[in-house]
Image (tube, helix red, strand yellow):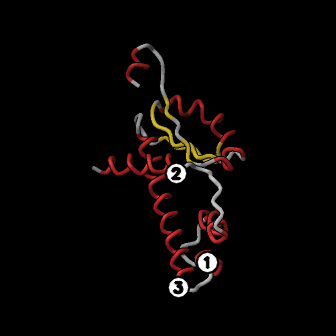
Amino acid sequence: DAAVTAKGGRFLEAPVSGSKGPAAAGQLIFLCGGDKELFAEVLPELGHMGKASFNFGSTGAGTRMKLVVNMTMGSMMATLGEGAALAEASGLSGGQLMEVLELGVMSSPLIKLKGPNLVKRKYPTQFPLKHAQKDMRFALALGD
């Protein structure tokens, strides 16, 4: 950021939340940090690629938000997988577990999207595990 502004430029980081499907559908969420005026200028372009755009302040804030979001999603996915495994191991239907979760306070797009494949033991890659692990390590470091 400082190197860019020292040369007269402006800088805006724009990490995204969303994987292949949301990207193809123009439904990304932009998690920006940096120059507020530049953010306002590029907001229309971001609107063509995403459903929401946020500026969290200084450079680095967007990346920190992405780490928090990805940590939360990773934790939810791990817990959903553990719940499905426990249901199956105890003789319960994984499909019925997903139905109960979708009807209750836990209902979320993540459960609706990932639950059926989890029950079928199909794991199409939308976000490689190595990237999720990297983000979890960075999120842990962020908390230190």
Q: Which residue is mark 3?
A: 90
Q: Is 59 on the left or on the right of 123, as rendered?
A: left
In the rendered view, would you say 108 is above or below 17? below
Q: Are marks 1 and 2 in contact (CB under 8 Å)?
A: no
Q: Could you say which is closer to the camera, residue 65 or residue 125?
A: 125
Q: Is 18 on the left or on the right of 141, as rendered?
A: right
Q: Earlier in the sequence, mark 3 or mark 2?
A: 3
Q: Is 140 on the left or on the right of 69, as rendered?
A: left
Task: Indicate the position of residue 120 as horizontal and vertical percent values.
Answer: 67, 69
Pointer 3 local density, CA inside 10 Å: few below 14, some 14–19, many at least 20: few
Q: Could you say which is closer to the camera, residue 81 or residue 48?
A: 81
Q: Residue at x 48, y 18 (%)?
A: 9
Which residue reaches farthest bottom?
91
Task: Indicate the position of residue 56 as horizontal and vertical percent values.
Answer: 45, 42
Q: Which residue is mark 1?
A: 94
Q: Residue flagged by tag 3: what amino acid is it?
A: Ser
So how many labels did they put on this image? 3
Q: Earlier in the sequence, mark 1 or mark 2?
A: 1
> Which disc, if any, is residue 129?
2
Task: Indicate the position of residue 102 as horizontal and vertical percent values.
Answer: 62, 74
